[in-house]
Image: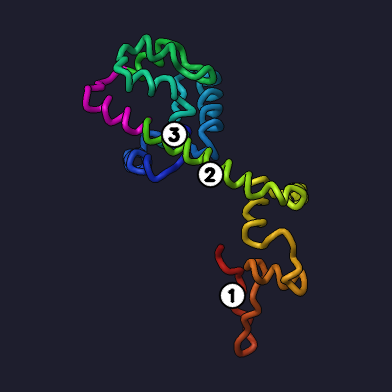
Amino acid sequence: TAFGVISIHNMPLLDAMARQGRIRFVPARGEAGAMNMADAYARVGRRLGVCITSTGTAAGNAAGAQLEALAAGTTDPVELAALADERLRATPEELQRALQGLMGAHQQFLLRQQLHHLAALDRQVADLDAEVETRCAPFDTARALLESLPGVGRRTAETILAEVGSTVRPFRSPAALAKWVGLAPGNHESAGKRLSGRTIPG
C-alpha cells in the first residue's frame, strides 16, 4: 500500500502501479496528509510506510534536506536517512534500504537545476504576494468582511476584490451579481421539458 498525491509528474508511476495491480494506492489531499497516513500505516502494521509526492513543493516538504544533500553529492544511505523528516516513522534501517540507489554526476546536476528553478519560483511567488498585498491594502475592510464568510479565505477574498471590486453598486441586485459571476443556474426549457440549467464554468 502506498499513500500520496496525484499530479501530472507522477502519473506514469501511478499508471504503472495500476497496471501491475500489486500495490494499492490511496490518494490524499496533500503531502502532509499522505505522510501522516503512511506514518500511521507503518506504526500499526509494523511495515514500511510509502508516501508518493509530486515534484516541486510537495517533494521539498517531504524530503527537502535529503534532496539538497543528494544535489550536493551525498549518496551514503546512512547520512541521507539521518536527514529524514521527523514525521517519517520508518526505522533508520528501512530508510537506508529505501535510499540505496545510483546518483551520478549527471543526475546531481539535473537535480541542482530543478532545485534552483523551484527556489526562483518561490521568490517570484513571494514578490507577487507582496504586490497583491500592497494593492489590496486600501481595501482591508472589504477584504476582512469577505474573509468572515464561511469558506472564503484570504486568496479567495482577494480574487473577489479583483474581479468584482470593493463595492457592488454597479449591480442592480444580488441576483444580478450572482448571474454575472456565473452562479445563477439557467432556465433552459424546450417543448415543456426542462433541460440542463447548470452554471457556467469559471
Residue 102 belongs to magenta span: yes
Q: Which residue is mark 1?
A: 196
On screen, residue 97 above or below 58 = above
Label 3–label 2 contact, CB within 8 A: no
Q: Residue at x 46, y 24 (%)?
A: 49
Task: Using the rendered view, name the quadrant where residue 184 is placed.
Answer: bottom right
The location of residue 69, given as percent across then percent down, is 36, 18
**Residue in front for this viewpoint, 25 or 71:** 71
Instruction: Give the magenta range.
Output: 100-115
Camera-nearest residue between 194 and 171: 171
- Residue 126: tell me if it is visible: yes
Of circles 1 and 3, which is in front? 3
Secondary structure of the residue carrying tag 1 is loop
Taking the image as shown, residue 133 lies to the left or right of residue 94, namely right
- In the rendered image, which residue does mark 2 sit on? 128
Q: Quadrant of the C terminus?
A: bottom right
Q: Secondary structure at mark 3?
A: loop
- Single out the mark in the foreground, 1 or 2: 2
- Which is nearer the eye, 46 or 109? 109
Tags 1 and 3 touching, CB below 8 Å? no
**Circle 3 sits on which residue?**
53
Mark 3 vs mark 2: give the one in front. 2
Question: Disc 1 or 2, which lies upstream in sequence?
Answer: 2
**In the rendered view, does 115 fall on the left or right side of 132?**
left
Position of residue 76 measured from the top left corner of the image (x, y, whole percent)? 31, 11
